[in-house]
Image (cartoon, rainbow, N blue to C red):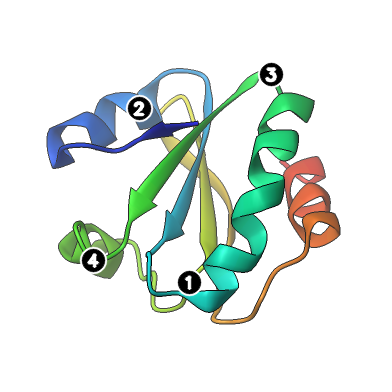
Amino acid sequence: MQKLMTIEEFEPLTAKGKTIFFFTADWCGDCSFIKPVMPEIVENHPDITFVEVDRDKFIDLCGDLSIFGIPSFVAFENGSEIGRFVNKDRKTKEEIESFISTL
């Protein structure tokens, strides 16, 4: 999974194919809970680009996208948002896989 390094990278990543942004933070316990299974989720979906976004580094982007709880996931395809799994609750691997299956 790649990491968003600059805000300028965001829009081009939304424009090509299917991309899921994983909003997280180092201090977030629920994020730490799900991070160990993220490589398996990524591997299960080779047709999707996964991008980790540090909420603290990109707080303005989170505001623009109404990301008020983490961990959260927002999916784009060819420039349009196609789904979101955004709330402040802990997420399980099964819940994330279920969200991805709806895209």
Q: Secondary structure at mark 1?
A: loop
Q: In the image, 80: left or right of 4? A: right
Residue at which label 4 appears? 56
CA gap, disc 3 and disc 4:
28 Å
CA gap, disc 1 and disc 3:
24 Å
Image mark for residue 70: 1
Q: Is residue 103 above or below residue 27?
A: above
Q: Residue at x 46, y 77 (%)?
A: 69
Residue 25, position in %: x, y? 38, 65
Q: Residues within 10 Å of mark 2 (few under 14, many from 20)?
A: many
CA gap, disc 2 and disc 4:
19 Å
Q: In the image, 65: left or right of 101? A: left
**Marks 3, 4: nearer the viewer:** 4
Q: In the image, 5: left or right of 41? A: left
CA gap, disc 3 and disc 2:
16 Å
Residue 27, position in %: x, y? 38, 74
Residue 60, position in %: x, y? 16, 64
Mark 1: amino acid: Ile
Q: Secondary structure at mark 2?
A: helix
| Mark 2 or 4, nearer chain start | 2
Q: In the image, 16: left or right of 61? A: right
Q: Residue at x 21, y 57 (%)?
A: 58
Image mark for residue 46: 3
Residue at which label 2 appears? 13
Q: Quadrant of residue 14?
A: top left
Mark 4: amino acid: Asp
| Mark 1 or 3, nearer chain start | 3
Front position in the image: 45 or 38: 38
Tell me if label 3 and label 4 are in contact, CB under 8 Å. Answer: no
Q: Residues within 10 Å of mark 3 (few under 14, many from 20)?
A: few
**Marks 1, 2: nearer the viewer:** 1
Q: Is residue 35 above or below residue 101?
A: below
